[in-house]
Image (cartoon, grey):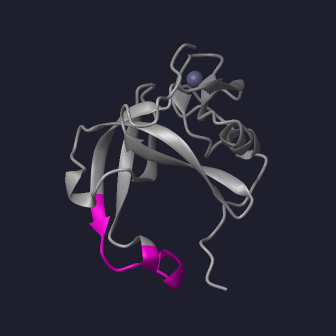
Amino acid sequence: VNEKPSPEITSLNREYFEGCALGELRVRRCLACEARFRFAHEWCPVCWSGELGWVKASGRGKVSHFSIVHQAPSPAFEPDAPYVIALVELDEGVRMMSTIKGCAPHEVAIGMRVEAGFEARNGADIPIFHPAGSLGVDTSE
Ligand SMILES: [Zn+2]
């Protein structure tokens, strides 16, 4: 079966994916300097503190860079092609790679406002970004 790869759940990202399952995009918060960042490390990339927590991000951001994939890297992605691989800068300042759905690839632009939705993939929910306003993300918190 040609399946898309699913994320490996580790101690570094477990709470992140638990958030995704609840429809929450979570980022790391440094308790020492308040930096926000992705889950790749057990230490703060700004001040090297190991005192970390998690915080729910707004799920909103903008496209920082993107490219359109015309040739799928594996058969599992062929039905999606052409699709967009984007570097999204969250309003919290955290950058993450994702894809943009909900519009045609040629409609994606640098600086375009986007919001996170979630898509189930092999037992884990992963964030997928859509043009802002199209999902009605709750930003009341
Ligand atoms: Zn820090």
| Residue 63 x, y percent position in the rendering | 31, 42
Give the residue displayed 54% in from the left and 13% down from the top: 140
Query: How many numbered marks have been drawn onto this rendered protein structure?
Result: 0
Q: Where is residue 122, by image quadrant? A: bottom right
Give the residue displayed 75% in from the left and 59% down from the top: 123
| Residue 34 x, y percent position in the rendering | 56, 17
Q: 83 or 38: which is nearer to us?
A: 83
- Highlighted range, magenta: 67-79
Q: Is residue 34 left or right of residue 8?
A: left
The image shows residue 80, relative to residue 112, as above or below, that is below
The image shows residue 7, relative to residue 15, as above or below, that is below
Q: 8 or 139: which is nearer to us?
A: 139
Q: Where is residue 21, by image quadrant? A: top right
Residue furthest to the right in view is: 11
Q: Where is residue 71, by image quadrant? A: bottom left
Q: Indicate which quadrant contains ligand 1.
A: top right
Verify whether residue 52 appears in magenta: no
Verify whether residue 70 appears in magenta: yes
Quadrant of the rendering where the N terminus is positioned:
bottom right
| Residue 37 x, y percent position in the rendering | 53, 33
Q: Is residue 66 left or right of residue 85?
A: left
Quadrant of the rendering where the C terminus is positioned:
top right
Give the residue displayed 30% in from the left and 75% down from the top: 70
Give the residue displayed 59% in from the left and 35% down from the top: 25
The image shows residue 53, relative to residue 80, as above or below, that is above
